[in-house]
Amino acid sequence: MGSHSHEVTDAILETLKLAGTALKDAGVRFALAGGCAAYARGAAPSLHDVDFVLVHDDVPIALDTLSKLGFRTQRPPEDWLVKAFDEGRLVDLIFRVSDRPVTPELIKRSEPLKASAVILPVLEATDLVISWLMPLSEHSCDYGSLLPQVRALREQVDWNRVASVVASSPYAFTFLTLLERLNIIAPVEPSGSPVWP
């Protein structure tokens, strides 16, 4: 990793710390997601932006909080997230994953972990993997970038629960087959309720 990528990682982690601490202080129901959550759970840093999932009702207070910090906020045409920018660094505030609203239950299952020297709620590992797999489609099916992240988290994940939630998605379920064939995970048996989040 060159010094430039270290600088980028450090800057992203600084943005994460600023935004996460402010959202926590404001009482927003949120959890760290994406590459930063994987990093907080022990995966190698692959940090391009900061992803938080949050309950839709808390979007206005989240935007207001980040705006007061000096972040530039934006409501893009997509109906599943809003954005905030700390100079050039992007924070995605995601309130729907694959047409499913982020629920208070999902946030309650998150675990307080150290991320960039602050303790923040981080998506539970099984939920984090599901949040990566559910959006896979014929237009967006990059197994290559998912593999190292998933390999790093594999022992923290309830793979049978992942299988039951993603069973309806051929793209997501095929990724599980790939993980089995690569001996990253044991064969999965969908179990439990496919309800998520």
Image: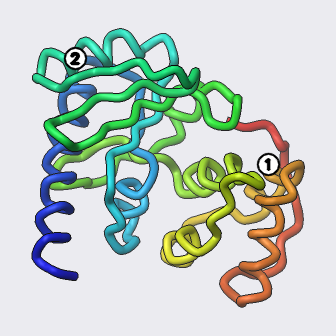
* Coloring scheme used: rainbow
Q: Position of residue 39 (x, y in %)?
A: 35, 63
- Residue 149 to residue 108: above or below: below
Comparing 42 with 111, the one in front is 42
Q: Is residue 31 above or below residue 189?
A: above
Location of mark 1 (residue): 165
Which label is found at residue 108? Answer: none
Residue assigned mark 2: 65
Q: Position of residue 46 (x, y in %)?
A: 36, 66
> Is residue 14 toward the left or the right of residue 16 in the image?
left
The quarter holding residue 154 reads: bottom right
Residue 59 location (% of width, % of height): 41, 16
Residue that appears at 76% across and 79% down: 178
Q: Decide: few, some or many residues near mark 2? Use Cα within 10 Å; few <14, some 14-19, many ≥20.
A: some
**What is the C-alpha distance between the residues marked 2 and 1?**
33 Å
Label 1 near label 2: C-beta < 8 Å? no
Residue located 88% across and 67% down the image: 189
16 to 82, vertically: above or below: below
Q: Is residue 109 left or right of residue 100?
A: left
Residue in the picture at 17% in, 35% down: 86
Q: Earlier in the sequence, mark 2 or mark 1?
A: 2
> What secondary structure is marked by label 2?
helix
Is disc 1 placed on a helix, strand or loop?
helix
Q: Position of residue 17 (x, y in %)?
A: 17, 43
Q: Is residue 104 visible to the viewer in this orientation of the structure? A: no
Residue 42 visible (yes or no) = yes
Q: Is residue 149 left or right of residue 21?
A: right
Q: Residue at x 67, y 47 (%)?
A: 135
Which residue is nearer to you in this view: 35 or 86? 86
Residue 71 drawn above or below residue 98: above
The disc labelled 2 sits on which kind of residue? Thr
